Image: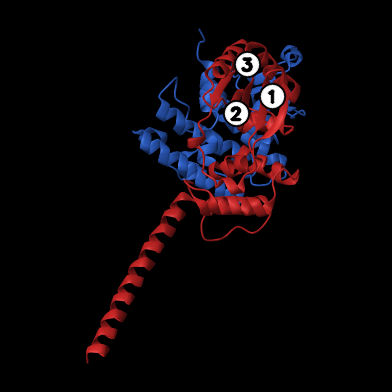
Amino acid sequence: MDDGALPPVSDDLLVAELSRLGLRHLSGVDEAMLHLQRLHPRHLLCGLVMSEDARVQMALVPLFLHCPSYGVHVPDAVDWLSKAGLPKSAFDAPAADTLQLYYQAAVYIQTSLQQGPPLTDLYSAALGLTPATQIMTPQDAEAAVQAVADIHAQRAGSKVINWARTYRHQLDVYAWYASPKP
Amino acid sequence: MFRSQQQQDDFFQHVAAVITQPCDLYVYGGTAMICLGLPKRQTNDVDVYTSGQVDLRSAVEQVATQFETKVDDFDPNEFVHLPSELLEPPQLYKRFDRLSVYIIDPHRIATDKLDRGLRNDILDVKWLLETNRINVTRMLACIEAARDVEDRQAMRARFAGIRGLPLPSSVSTPQAASHSRGSFWRRLGWGIVVAVLLVVVIILIVSG
């Protein structure tokens, strides 16, 4: 469903959609929600960015790694968030910036993991960052993620959050749930 | 999985049904936050300390497999070290038959979170503060006394930010911390030079 507008998206709906996509690392999947209509990718991306629950927003990086095709919808979601004029949450950058920065961090993290198809480098030029094609070593990737984090802190107007670690935090638990169990 | 305290309690109840003798289980991280009543979603892992009790560890793993959840059995040495006088003993959360579940001091949890500084950590510490589960005075003492922290200045800045205070302008990034350490060594170097010059002057005055 995509009628252009963004319907209210609850965290329950977001987590159910993530679960349907195979991301089961967040707690509290409401089984009843799994039978509702699927969320359009733009709604999922915007909903995750706007979630007031830190761990729900932090699912963006695992989502991009697990479903690289969602990268196609990022510019559309960024455009919607830019026009929506949403209030900025405490410690956060504006929502459109936040989505761009999470995505760009995922691009570099994916480069260092070298798993699955690469994410399209959408924002390195606009953000003044190293192009993903020039990331050769894990150290390059780490430095690039730190550069994204520095921009994030600058746009948030606050250095309270360690963004570089935040981007990577859910990867362990996501990988555990994504791996086959005996 | 653990959508609520009740569901998490169900996990503990299952562990209690497996163990054959009384055991103490310590919880931290997201698991402790649920025990403390944080009304937020968590990642699907159980953060516990089984303190070397092999049977308990085995029971937790068995039930975790049944619940399809990941277990993080933490090693206290991996976390920041705090003087014992700053910490309260673990607080009993609930007893489940033979299993007693304890929450480690929220000040310790908050100190670890300030050291790490993830987005969820910051919001968790804010909630702990707002719900009076930690107090400012003891947190400030914990920040100053914590050993093996990554960047104490960043911890101070984070706690100030959470309290809505202006951030110290000096530092809060690793690069800035490194610069700060550089300044310290430069100041120490100049201090030594001045001290040596003073000693030389005193010797000249005394001998002459």
From the top left corner, tell me how far across and down residue A147 is, in percent.
46, 44
Name the residue rendered at 61%, 39% in the picture.
B109
Q: Amino acid at mark 1?
A: Leu
In the image, residue B154 above or below residue B54: below
State which chain is coloured blue. A
Can residue A170 be seen from the camera position used here?
yes
Residue on which the image places disc 1: A14
Q: Please name which of the two marks, 1 or 3, marks the residue nearer to the observer.
A: 3
Q: Amino acid at mark 3?
A: Gln
CA gap between label 1 and label 2 equals 10 Å
Tags 1 and 3 on a common chain: no
CA gap between label 1 and label 3 equals 42 Å
Q: Circles 1 and 2: CB distance less than 8 Å? A: yes
Viewport quadrant of the N terminus of chain B: top right
Return the mark for residue B21: 3
Residue on which the image places disc 2: A59
Q: As rendered, which of B24 and B41 lies closer to the eye?
A: B24
